[in-house]
Image (spheres, grey):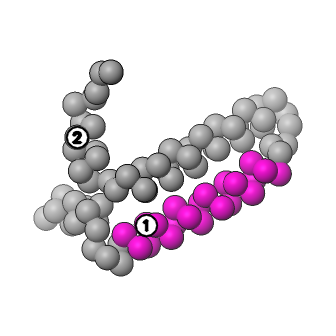
Amino acid sequence: MLEAPWDDDLERLVPRKIMLATWHLHNLIYIRYFYESLGQQPPMWVKNEMERSQGALTDELDREKGQGGRLYKAARELLK
């Protein structure tokens, strides 16, 4: 399997739980777009799962920020 040169840096900066939650939400956005591009409303399960996933991701980001996690340490370093 080929790996992008930035994979190691990305895994070092972004906690795995946040990365997986982001990917899941991103996939749901594509599913919603697919339905909307056909002129249909997405099913309720997609809307409900998007809402749940967004809440879970926000909670994880808040927890990460509150604990001074890797993601926020890296951001502070970049701003210096």
Q: Residue 50 colored magenta? A: yes
- Residue at 24% x, 50% y is 12
Which picture quadrant has residue 65?
bottom left
Name of the residue lying farthest toward the bottom:
66
Q: Position of residue 42 (x, y in %)?
A: 80, 43
- Residue at 78% x, 35% y is 35
- Residue at 18% x, 58% y is 78
The residue labelled by disc 1 is: 61
Name of the residue lying farthest toward the top:
1
Sort mark 2 into few (<14), some (14-19) or many (20+) by Cα contacts within 10 Å: few
Name of the residue lying farthest toward the front:
1
Which picture quadrant has residue 28?
top right
Q: Nearer the viewer, mark 2 or mark 1?
A: 2
Q: Position of residue 43 (x, y in %)?
A: 83, 45
- Residue at 32% x, 54% y is 14
Instruction: Examine the rendering and report whether any part of residue 38 can be seen.
Output: yes
Q: Position of residue 59 (x, y in %)?
A: 51, 70
SS under mark 1: helix
- On the rendered structure, is 57 left or right of 79? right
Name above or below for residue 78 compared with residue 26: below
Main SS class of the magenta portion in the image:
helix
Front position in the image: 76 or 68: 68
SS under mark 2: helix
Residue 8: give its label: 2
Residue 77: give its label: none
- Number of labels in the image equals 2
Which residues make up the magenta segment? 44-64
Sort mark 1 into few (<14), some (14-19) or many (20+) by Cα contacts within 10 Å: some
